[in-house]
Amino acid sequence: MTPIETVQQIYAAFGRGDVPAILAHLADDVEWEYNAFPNPAPWLQTIKGRANVPAFFQALGAIRLTQFEPRQFFGDDRTVVDLVDVRFVVEATGKEVIEPEAVHIWHFDDAGKVRRFRHRVDTWQTAQALKGD
């Protein structure tokens, strides 16, 4: 399976809510949200280790996704970058966040497992929605 196919399988599992299937594609020492800057979004925090990644999915309980559409994939045998159209509503405030072409970056190890993952998104827009502005 190519790295792009792996990412597509991860997204399919995400759509089904199948966290164990996602975790199966991650290296034991995965860095989730590597090099993330401090921000108020609970789902955009740095996590280290596959055993801790379920915290990311739990944090997504703060939002209601209304759109999640992977659009384009670029990559080679070590890295995949994809553009994803995302819309969500912050449950606590009712504010909507629209992220056309959010960037997801996936890095793979020699075994074909995800070693590092990062969202590149508009954290300012998310922070405002979390505050209710």
Image: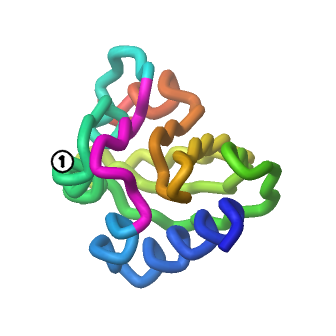
For residue 124: magenta? no
When the figure is inspected, residue 34 is found, relative to residue 82, above or below; the finding is above
From the top left corner, tell me how far across and down residue 100 is, in percent.
Answer: 71, 47
From the top left corner, tell me how far across and down residue 107 is, in percent.
Answer: 58, 42
Residue positioned 18% across, 47% down in the render: 52
When the figure is inspected, residue 120 is found, relative to residue 66, above or below; the finding is above
Residue at mark 1? 52
Left or right relative to 113: residue 23: left
- In terms of depth relative to the viewer, which is nearer, 43 or 77? 77
Identity, as a three-letter code, of the amino acid under mark 1? Asn
Residue positioned 50% across, 22% down in the render: 124
Prevailing secondary structure of the magenta residues: strand
Left or right relative to 124: residue 86: right
- In terms of depth relative to the viewer, which is nearer, 60 or 130? 60
From the top left corner, tell me how far across and down residue 71 is, in percent.
Answer: 78, 62
Q: Secondary structure at mark 1?
A: helix
Give the residues in magenta.
25-34
